[in-house]
Image (spheres, rainbow, N blue to C red):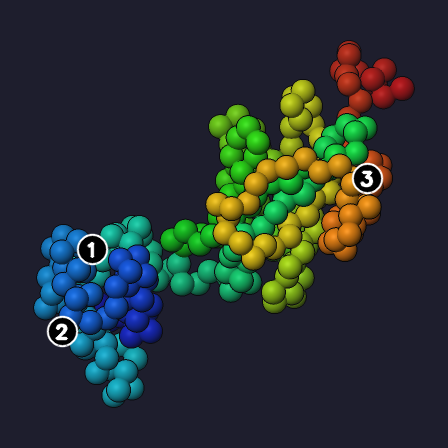
């Protein structure tokens, strides 16, 4: 069965395939594609797919008819359910895609000690989603990003913990610092919340390291960035929120 596929979508499909296989749209690249994708031969990717797509662009034809079975096979190889699923992924919010990169997450530790916890974060596109991965000291978290009313929402989960983060994005095109709030469960299994930061980094995620930062050391640092982070997290009451320890789970707990 054939379907009318937009040339623009086919071009993006081929570009994604080249990126995955680290090849170009040439003889060697087409041969590699045919070798690794079952039921797709060189003639199809070279002539029917790339060849017809190229001619259509020259003739300014927006859509061409191709076998849906072959397009589904290529899409499945790239991690999608089918070609329609791939097409749906192209509608990802460009504002989320702009966030892809490496970051440090900062939160103030939930006790009277003036310590800030720094954790590596990676925001990446995964098929039709944008995912945030946070590497903690003892566990890793992961969650899908969503954008609503100028704010980014992320429910991050590990095997035994859950945290929810919300960051203000607004109309920023290339944010370096994102301010937000978090809520979750403490190591003592109590509800906690507070302010958090994401600061973009120029180095790869694998090179980022977890670290506890002393607020006083941040405040006296020669680095303006560190000083600003120290000032932001200096006051406990501005950064941390927790409940009273309940005893009877009645109104007496509030007195």
Residue 220 placement (x, y as % from top left): 82, 46
Q: Mark 2 points at which residue?
A: 47
Marks 1 and 3: in contact by CB < 8 Å? no
Using the rendered image of the protein, determine whether residue 16 is visible from the camera's viewpoint: yes
> How far, Cα to Cα, is label 3 from label 1?
57 Å
Q: Where is residue 177 in the image (x, y as percent from the top left)?
A: 67, 56
Quarter of the rendering containing residue 17: bottom left
Q: Residue at x 25, y 52 (%)?
A: 76
Mark 2 closeness class: few <14, some 14–19, many ≥20 residues within 10 Å: few
- Residue furthest toward the front? 222
* Residue 132 appears in view: no
Of 63 and 165, which appears nearest the observer?
165
Disc 2, SS: helix
Sequence order check, earlier mark of 3 and 2? 2
Q: In the structure shown, which secondary structural element does the residue marked by tag 1 occupy?
A: helix
**Mark 1 Cα-neighbour bin, 10 Å: few <14, some 14–19, many ≥20:** some
CA neighbours of label 3 inside 10 A, class few (<14), some (14 to 19), many (20+): some
Question: SS of the residue at dot 3?
Answer: helix
Q: In this view, does 237 lie above or below 100?
A: above
Q: Which residue lies furthest to the right in this view?
A: 255
What separation in Å lies between label 2 and label 1 (alpha carbons)? 17 Å
Which residue in the rendered view is the most extreme toward the top?
248
Residue that appears at 31% across and 66% down: 15
Q: Distance between the residues labelled 3 and 2?
A: 65 Å
Which residue carries the number 3 mark?
216
Question: x, y percentage for residue 71?
Answer: 22, 61
Classify the position of the C terminus by image quarter: top right
Q: Nearer the viewer, mark 2 or mark 1?
A: 2
Residue at position x 78%, y 41% in the image: 217
Q: Label 1, on which residue?
A: 73
């Amino acid at each position: 069965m054939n379907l009318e596929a937009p040339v623009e979508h086919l071009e993006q499909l081929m570009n994604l395939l080249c990126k995955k296989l680290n090849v170009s749209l040439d003889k060697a690249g087409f041969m590699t594609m045919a070798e690794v994708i079952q039921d797709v031969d060189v003639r199809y990717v070279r002539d029917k797919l790339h060849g017809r797509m190229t001619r259509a662009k020259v003739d300014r034809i927006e859509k061409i008819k191709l076998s849906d079975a072959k397009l589904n096979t290529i899409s499945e190889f790239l991690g999608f359910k089918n070609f329609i699923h791939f097409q749906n992924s192209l509608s990802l919010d460009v504002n989320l895609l702009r966030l892809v990169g490496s970051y440090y997450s900062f939160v103030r530790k939930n006790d009277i000690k003036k310590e800030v916890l720094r954790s590596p974060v990676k925001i990446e596109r995964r098929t039709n989603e944008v995912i945030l991965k946070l590497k903690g000291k003892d566990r890793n978290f992961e969650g899908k990003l969503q954008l609503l009313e100028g704010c980014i929402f992320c429910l991050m989960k590990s095997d035994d913990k859950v945290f929810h983060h919300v960051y203000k994005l607004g109309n920023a095109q290339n944010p370096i610092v994102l301010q937000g709030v978090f809520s979750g469960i403490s190591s003592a299994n109590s509800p906690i919340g507070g302010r958090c930061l994401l600061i973009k980094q120029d180095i790869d995620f694998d090179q980022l390291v977890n670290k506890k930062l002393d607020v006083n050391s941040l405040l006296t640092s020669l680095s303006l960035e560190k000083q600003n982070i120290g000032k932001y997290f200096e006051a406990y009451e501005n950064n941390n929120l927790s409940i009273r320890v309940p005893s009877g789970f009645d109104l007496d707990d509030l007195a």
